Amino acid sequence: MLLVVSPLWFMAVYLCLIALLPVFLWLHERWDSTVLVFLAAAAGAVDILRFRYDLEWLGIVNMVAVWALCHQLGFFYERLVHAARRADWTLLWAGLAALCGLVASGLYPGSMVGVPGETSNMAPPTLCIVALVAFQAGVAEVLRPRVELRLQRARWQRVNETINRFSMPLFLFHTTGMALHRAVRYAVAGNRNEAREPTLGWWLYRPLAFIGPLLFTLPVIFVFGRQWVKQARPPASTPAPAN
């Protein structure tokens, strides 16, 4: 059950951010981009206290500080879109350099998501997530002009529409399909499904590993998620009244 509902953890964070939206708007209107600096500084201070003095309970502060920074960054979307190209590249390289530096320091784990048997920078979020969101925002802005040009073509528009139709059902139901797939695998072969070491054969099989869970996910989408994959139809035009 935990495997199935775990991707929805962000909903609790998102609801908290929405509840605090009046506070974030006030901070944005009063201090603008300075808010991002202080939120990043708060995240770094929490990390120092956690790692140096083993105050793990302080991680709850970063559940607000880090995700609030990511949320607050969205207030600057229009400015990022209209910024010079060098600003996009600056954001990209600054985020990447900070991310590499933090992970290489040995103080932060290399995983940005939760992985069984390994700590991550996600729970609670750390300063690495701040660097990661800066890097991702830079990548998105660097690629945006070319993507917008591609989306003016009819074929790319159809591809984009198809992806958008299935993105939410896949996100909501992919772990259900994966759980069903793993249950069948273990029923058939037990622990022989799991490789003891990442051998060459294991790596070569990785690109194909999504096919099984996908085959189990599609029926789940068909049963529970059909309302999300219906193709949008333009509204019927109303005939002009006769004179």
Image (spheres, rainbow, N blue to C red):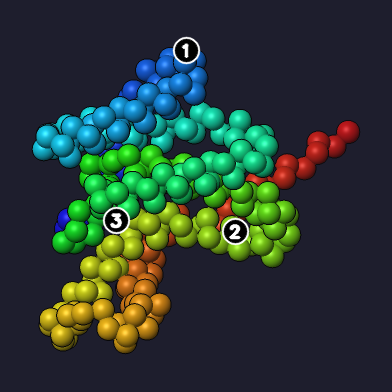
Q: Residue 185: x and y, percent?
A: 20, 80
Q: Position of residue 107 (x, y in %)?
A: 24, 47
| 219 w.r.t. 229: above or below | below
Residue 62: numbered disc: none
Number of the label disc, if any, that sits on residue 30: 1
- At which x and y percent is residue 3? 21, 59
Question: On screen, 69 above or below 171?
Answer: above
Residues marked 1 and 3 touching at CB (< 8 Å): no
Q: Is residue 113 above or below residue 217?
A: above
Residue 8 appears in the rendering: no
The kind of residue on which mark 3 rests is Ser
Q: Which residue is mark 3?
A: 111
Residue 189: x and y in percent read: 16, 86
The residue drawn where x is 61% and y is 38% is: 87
Q: Nearer the viewer, mark 2 or mark 1?
A: 1
Find disc 2 in the rendering and name its residue.
Answer: 160
Element type at mark 3: loop
Which amino acid type is shown beneath numbered disc 2?
Asn
Q: Is residue 181 visible?
A: yes
Q: Is 205 left or right of 231, judged from the image as shown?
A: left
**Label 1: few (<14), some (14–19) or many (≥20) C-alpha neighbours in 10 Å:** few
Please identify the quadrant where the N terminus is shown: bottom left
